[in-house]
Image (cartoon, rainbow, N blue to C red):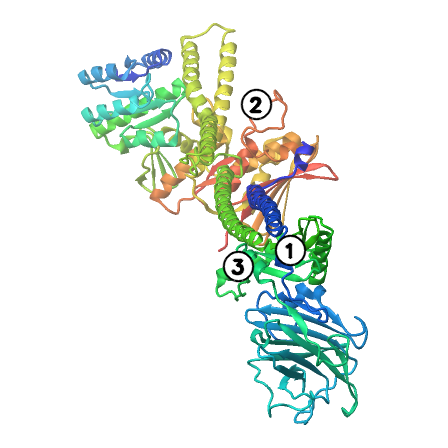
Amino acid sequence: MAKHIVIVEDDRDQRDNYQFALEQRGYRVTAYAGKDQAELGLKQERPDLVILDIIMDENIDAGFQLCAALLKIHPELPVLFLTERVGEIDRILGLRMGAWDYQPKPVSLDFLAEKVATLIRLSDIRVVTAEIDDQNIRVIGHLQLLEESRQAKWRDQAIAGLTLTEFRMIEALTRRPGHILTYDTLAQATHQHYVSNNTISTHIRNIKRKLKNIDAEFDAVKSEYGMGYRWSEN
Amino acid sequence: MLFANRRLRFRLNTQVLVFALVLVSIPWLSYRFVAETRVFMIEGQTQAQEQLARGIVTLFQGRDDLLAELPYLDSQQVVFSHPLTGQAKVDGYTNEWLDFQLFANHFGSGDDSEDGYSLLLGEKDDRIFGLVRIQDNKTVLRTKGAPNLDASDHLRLTMPDRNGNERRLVIVATQAGVMEVWYVKEDWATPQYRSPSSSFIIQAVMRPLVDGYLVEFALPKYFLNQRQEFGLAVADVDGEDGSMRHLKTLVGADTTIESHFNLLAMRAPEANKILSSLSRSDSQVVIYDNNLQVRASVGQVSPPKSEQVKPKDFLEGIQSWLNQGLDWFIAIPDYLNPVQAASQERDLLNRALDKKFASGRWHKGPAEQIFAVAAPIVDQEGELLGVVLIKQSTAQILGLQRQAMENIALLSLSTMLVILLVLLLFSWRQAMRIRRLGREAQQIVDPDGRLRTDQLYNEIRAGDEIGDLARSFSGVVARLHEHQEFMSTMPRTLRHEVNNPLNATMTSLENLQMLGVEEGQQRYIDSAQRGLVKISGIVEKLADAANLEAALHEDELEPLDLLHLLQTYVHHQNPSIRGGAADVVFEANQQSVFVAGVDYRIEQLLDKLLDNARDFRASGSLVKVRLYQQDYDCYLEVENTGPSIPPDLMAGMFNSMVSARAAGAGHAHFGLGLYIVRLISQFHGGSVTAHNLRQPEGVMFRVKLPILLV
């Protein structure tokens, strides 16, 4: 049975494009143009995933308000913010509210589809409590990459809060350990349209921070100043 | 503009001070008023005096009996007594005689001869005063205890008493000062009594002069008989032992005094009685007969002066000082000495003797003016009987003027001081307020020219014009701040606004591609997507720069080996890695330099500086990256040869959206690179400066960072 995805987006063009792209990938999609309309519809049926814009019409926090209302009814509902509000504060606020991910615009539809798939897969795992060991796991030194759930472990501990972009960057870095990955290669790995060197460095900083939360001595991501980054546990 | 700069500038305090000086005109105007009043009063007084003179003349008109009542004898010489004013003292000094000097009676061979003497007689209260000035080239004093009284220079005085007996007195000096007065027998040499007369009754004082000596004496009026006869002789003894003795001069022509009683002419009682009703405190009326001898006199010219007291306290001290200032201010410097004044008076009398009405004024002292009127008194036939002279002092008017001046000066000074003080305080306060406002206005802008706040806090509640100014300025600041906020949030707003249509367009293209396009159409879809990615990049760059300050606060500073970072960075510019020609060289002493930093921010800084250097370098030249340490700082320099930075760009080149690149030249440039370099340098506790180089021409950017002290 096709997974049911709800899209709440006030811009008709984007809403239609998301709907079309996801339906083309086999999902059942219901799209709402506003907060009130969505709230009404979502009370009747629990979808498998909700994609929310934040600013809708004149209400600049409509997405946040809707998210809070939905999670009260369905606490385990995967919520993905897809928004033009790209500030760090907005990102933190959205995630703290219980959203599963936060994706700034513009986004490529392929990337969106992959993100949706990952989130639904994670949701399914949580629901059926499937054994992670059964998944396709790639091991690089102390690092384990769980390809199915797009999760990673360092020294057998799950890296908390790892985003899809960060997983993709770690995956790219560890494809050829010891070799330098240029900024351009890392940008391609994010599957985004435009990624600056600074954005990549910010992602790397976040990856290092999350790994150091597990292992204070973590030093496997090396900076190759002026060129890119390299994975090396030595 | 140049002219404007040369204009004199007066600060507020100076302006107030100049304005306050205008207040000086107040006492000056007051002074003018008082001076005019004085002139008016004196004029009035003069007229009153003339009227009085005419009145007196009318009273005496035809009353020849009043002036001719004295019982003259042909053989007697009349010596007139003068009314003494003020305090008459027997002290050997002539203060009280000054007004009468010209009326002195001269006896002997002549005024200038060795044998002459002059005599002035005066009266005051119940006493007769005499002043005898004797010319004598050798003054012989009496030896105390000598038996004879005629062995030294002496005065002989004889007066018939009311019983017809003759009283003989010898006044002789044993030394300068108080003289001895002896009653003598007929030989003028033998004392009648063993000791001299009491000095309480008859006083006499001798004072030596350059050409002789002076005797001042006083005796009671009752010594004189009714006819007021008296005789006076001066005996001059020149012999060293006193043996040669002769009477140098006697009153009268003979050498003996016995038969010569002269007449002491007192004032005419009837005339005096008439005049007494006209007596005034500040004026003197004198009636002269046609021989210019005083026949009647009432009043006195100068009222008694109050004694000078020393200032007791501070206020009186100030007043005393003020008085001296006033003396200087209102004093009339050209005043006449007593002799000149007497000459003026004599002149008036002479004119009156010619039957003319005469008046005149002269200054007697620094604060006293005398004005006098002399009018002839004639009988019915037109014969001159005498002269009336009225003298009056302006001392009272001048005193009043002085008092008024004192009051005005004190009041004006204190008022001026208070006003000046208030004005100075007021201007000081206003200047302080304006300065405070100016300081706040200066501090409201940070060194990079950005407003720190959106309003002023000083003076905006004040109700006056400064308050209006502060409020207006605060309004301008608020608007500028709003504009600044708009400019700083504009990139983010732009991103918000652009991202939605951009996302719609991009996703539409993706869906179109998914639906499948005909051959030949794909290239246009690719081209559109590339264009959209460029737009996305531009928006991202703008937003990143706008968010950089906030983003930097999320970065954590860590110990960072700057040498290693730079070596690695420059190494990765190597053509074997990047392709193309080697264009960057690194110069450093091989010592690690640690700073507290964020590596990818330093990398970002280097990206911007190298981009800049590459864009502006001379074709084919190298970009030099240099690192060195000096004291507690390290310096990272990026240098290229090429055109210098224009001076007008130098000041603001590290601000946002300032670029030297021509519009439309290659990639999109928003003048954000050096702004980012500045923000990152400042975030690391350092600074960045730009320097133009000569020989070869070029530009060098120097980033100064504090080293990490372990």
How many angstroms separate mark 3 from mark 1 (CA)? 57 Å
Give the vertical position of B4 relative to B199 (above or below): above
Rendered location of residue B187, percent (x, y): 70, 89
Task: Quickly name the residue at label 3.
Answer: B318
Task: Quickly name the residue at label 2.
Answer: B668
Horizontally, is A174 left or right of B86 in the view?
left
First along the sequence among labels 3 and 1: 1
Q: Chain of mark 3?
A: B
Q: Nearer the viewer, mark 2 or mark 3?
A: 3
**The disc label shown at residue B562, or none:** none
Q: Do circles 2 and 1 both sit on a common chain? A: yes
First along the sequence among labels 2 and 3: 3
First along the sequence among labels 2 and 1: 1
Dot 3 alpha-carbon crowd within 10 angstroms: few under 14, some 14 to 19, many 20 or more: few
Q: Nearer the viewer, mark 2 or mark 1?
A: 1
Q: Chain of mark 1?
A: B
**Kind of residue indicated by mark 2:** Ala
- Given residues A234 and B435, the one toward you in this image is B435
How many angstroms separate mark 2 from mark 1 (CA)? 132 Å
**Kind of residue indicated by mark 3:** Ile
The N terminus of chain B lies in quadrant:
top right
What is the residue that sits farthest to the top in this orientation? B518
Q: Is residue A195 visible?
A: no
How many angstroms separate mark 2 from mark 3 (CA)? 83 Å
Give the vertical position of A13 relative to A46 (above or below): above
**Residue at 68%, 81% in the rendered image:** B156
**Residue at 78%, 83% in the rendered image:** B138
Q: Do circles 2 and 3 both sit on a common chain? A: yes
Task: Quickly name the residue at label 1.
Answer: B64
Q: Is residue B274 visible?
A: yes
**Kind of residue indicated by mark 1:** Asp
Secondary structure found at label 2: loop
